[in-house]
Amino acid sequence: MEEFFSFQALFFSLLFALSLFFFLLSKNLSKESISTGLRAYPLVGNLPDFIKNRHRILEWLTEIVIEHPTNTVTFRRPGKVQGIITANPMNVEHMLKTNFENYPKGRRATVFLHDLLGTGIFNSDGETWKAQRKTASFEFSKRSLRNFVMETVQQEIQNRLLPLLQTATKTNKTIDLQDILERFAFDNICMVAFNQDPKCLFFDSSCNLSSSPFAHAFEQAANLSAERFRYTFLFILKIKKRFNLGSETILNQSISTINDFAMNIIRSRKTSNNKENAQETDLLSRFIISTNNDTTGNNSDEFLRDIIISFILAGRDTTSSTLAWFFWLLSSNPQVERKIIRELQSKRAQFQKNPSEMFDFEELREMQYLHAAITEALRLYPPVAVDSRECKEDDVMPDGTVVKKGWFVTYNAYAMGRLEGIWGRDCGSFVPERWLDEKGMFRAESPYRFPAFHAGPRMCLGKEMAYIQMKSIVACVVERFEIDVLGKDKCPDHFLSLTMRIKGGLPVRVRERKR
Ligand code: HEM
Ligand SMILES: *[C@@H]1O[C@H](CO)[C@@H](O)[C@H](O)[C@H]1NC(C)=O
Ligand SMILES: *[C@@H]1O[C@H](CO)[C@@H](O)[C@H](O)[C@H]1NC(C)=O
Ligand SMILES: *[C@@H]1O[C@H](CO)[C@@H](O)[C@H](O)[C@H]1NC(C)=O
Ligand SMILES: *[C@@H]1O[C@H](CO)[C@@H](O)[C@H](O)[C@H]1NC(C)=O
Ligand SMILES: *[C@@H]1O[C@H](CO)[C@@H](O)[C@H](O)[C@H]1NC(C)=O
Ligand SMILES: *[C@@H]1O[C@H](CO)[C@@H](O)[C@H](O)[C@H]1NC(C)=O
């Protein structure tokens, strides 16, 4: 029995991927599990493997799809939970684009995040999603938003990140770079979303980092919402929620804190926006303006709150996860670091910038090698390692795999980065050059072969913003500092919460780089 619980708990931590699957599993098996125990549940017919591999569930799910000839594995058990996991680009294209309508997120996969996200863009389907997507993509296509992103990123780097690293070189203390990157990302997404600065990366004279009540509540709500996916028996969660017990009390409180904070800002912004000079800067003001004439209720305060909270969740720990893995990869690939530095130096010369000036958008865009190096980190460590959809009607995948109504359909982006068929024999190595053409220009890969940002109509909206942020940070940090990663020779373990992060953080020591 104990085995059963622990393997379930671990399995559940594959939040995006197998939530649906697992939810059904626990629901369908709860009665039997009491009477017959573990052996009653042959998953894929290889439960022993499953148990054996439960500490390395992502690797195991990666091995089985890589080994299978079509790169697709079916979890089949008539009358019980069923679904497929795939690393086949044809199937990915089919589920994310060609037959998009048949593969929504699904009610059962969105239920866990509903209290936090409501029907915000990240957690809805159908018309509710479409209306938000339309408004949001329009705003994300504007140059004015990109400029605002650039401005907020530069300020955070100048005023917080560089001074912090500077101090670290003096104290020679070990710092957790992943934590610093997470704080950076949270400050930045809050600025972009509603022009609020939670000051997570702010530090005092004794180097203590601060925290705002909003940031704390958000982290807690994200943590506890993620933990909800781990419940073996859903009725326990329902009871806890119904009577407001234990972790559900804390979750309820943290969501209230978030909502109050957001609602106050929305209300005061609406009042000030009504006075003539409404400015298009952050996402909130943009959504207020673009939904102003809406008579369908899509401009209610709650609607605005949900969409803003969705953006904060989507933008909060994806870039930090990517960069944490990136800096670890860089530490064991000094030849890549040298090439990045060479590119930075040549751009400084080309644009005649003095050493303290920051690179702007156009200059960053010319950094093809840096772009390739970050993308290469995303290939090996996609923050959303696995992602699931729910099948609406019976269907057949391009590789012949049958899927039935109600099944989960999951793609494994982590496995796809490790497929020889896509990347060749050196697929396990960190080689930015694979992204460059003969002229050294970045060559994009099909998003169905490289789905780190998802693909099709629901592709990530923050991709450009993410690259602006990541390239700015790497350019500034690598030029000025040498980052010593402690224990760099061992690949860190990952930790699956809402994104795939480095377990225990990324301890580093920072030194001034001699220029
Ligand atoms: C390296 C950084 C990032 C990666 C790898 C990434 C990846 C992804 C992925 C895989 C999805 C699909 C998730 C799902 O539907 O289950 C997604 C959706 C989304 N992302 Fe990103 N993301 C990144 C950064 C950002 C940032 C900075 C923002 C904020 C502006 C953002 C905003 C969104 C939004 C709003 C969606 C939902 C789109 C929709 O459902 O229509 N992302 N992202
Ligand atoms: C920083 O600390 C490490 C380990 O404690 C030590 O090996 C190193 O020499 C120190 N560097 C400086 C510049 O003090
Ligand atoms: C900073 O943190 C240290 C150790 O956690 C604590 O002893 C100290 O009082 C803090 N300083 C300030 C100014 O908060
Ligand atoms: C959220 O979870 C992370 C990882 O387990 C932990 O380090 C952090 O302290 C948690 N934060 C809160 C506010 O509970
Ligand atoms: C918190 O709990 C109260 C009382 O049960 C409930 O009315 C409220 O809707 C809950 N709030 C959230 C955000 O779940
Ligand atoms: C809203 O209506 C006003 C007046 O009818 C119009 O000038 C404005 O362009 C409209 N805005 C949008 C976003 O449709
Ligand atoms: C929002 O707008 C869409 C289309 O404009 C509509 O279908 C939907 O019902 C509206 N949502 C609400 C909550 O009124």
Image (cartoon, rainbow, N blue to C red):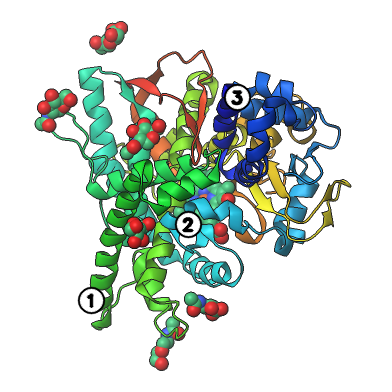
Alpha carbon distance from label 3 to label 2: 31 Å
| Crowd class of label 1 (few under 14; some 14 to 19; many from 20; radius 10 Å) | few
Q: Are marks 2 and 1 in contact (CB under 8 Å)?
A: no
Query: For this rendering, which residue is in front, 252 or 290?
Result: 252
Of tags 3 and 2, the one toward the viewer is 3
Considering the numbered disc 1 on the image, is that residue within a helix, a strand or a loop? helix
Q: Which mark is residue 413?
A: none
* Mark-to-mark CA distance, 1 and 3: 59 Å
- Residue on which disc 2 sits: 114
Q: Quadrant of the N terminus?
A: top right
Residue sitting at x 42%, y 59%: 146
Q: Which three-letter amino acid code belongs to the residue tagged 2?
A: His
First in residue order: circle 3 vs circle 2: 3
Badge number at residue 272? 1
Q: CA distance from mark 2 to mark 1?
A: 30 Å
Q: Earlier in the sequence, mark 2 or mark 1?
A: 2
Ligand 2 position by quadrant: top left
Q: Residue at x 60, y 44 (%)?
A: 19
**Where does the C terminus fall, quadrant-wise?**
top left
Placement of 452 over or under 176, stated as above or below: below
Is residue 309 left or right of 357 when viewed as pictured? Answer: right
Q: Nearer the viewer, mark 2 or mark 1?
A: 2
Instruction: Point out which mark residue 1 bears.
Output: 3
Q: In this rendered view, identify the residue nearer to me: 313 or 2.
A: 2
Amino acid on which the number 1 mark rests in the picture: Ser
Looking at marks 1 and 3 on the same chain, the residue that comes earlier in the sequence is marked by 3
Report if residue 460 is visible in the image: no
Toward which corner of the image does residue 9 lie, by quadrant?
top right
Check disc 3 and give the amino acid type.
Answer: Met
- Residue 327 x, y percent position in the rendering: 46, 27
Q: In this picture, is 13 found above or below 212?
A: above
Mark 1 or 3, closer to the camera: 3
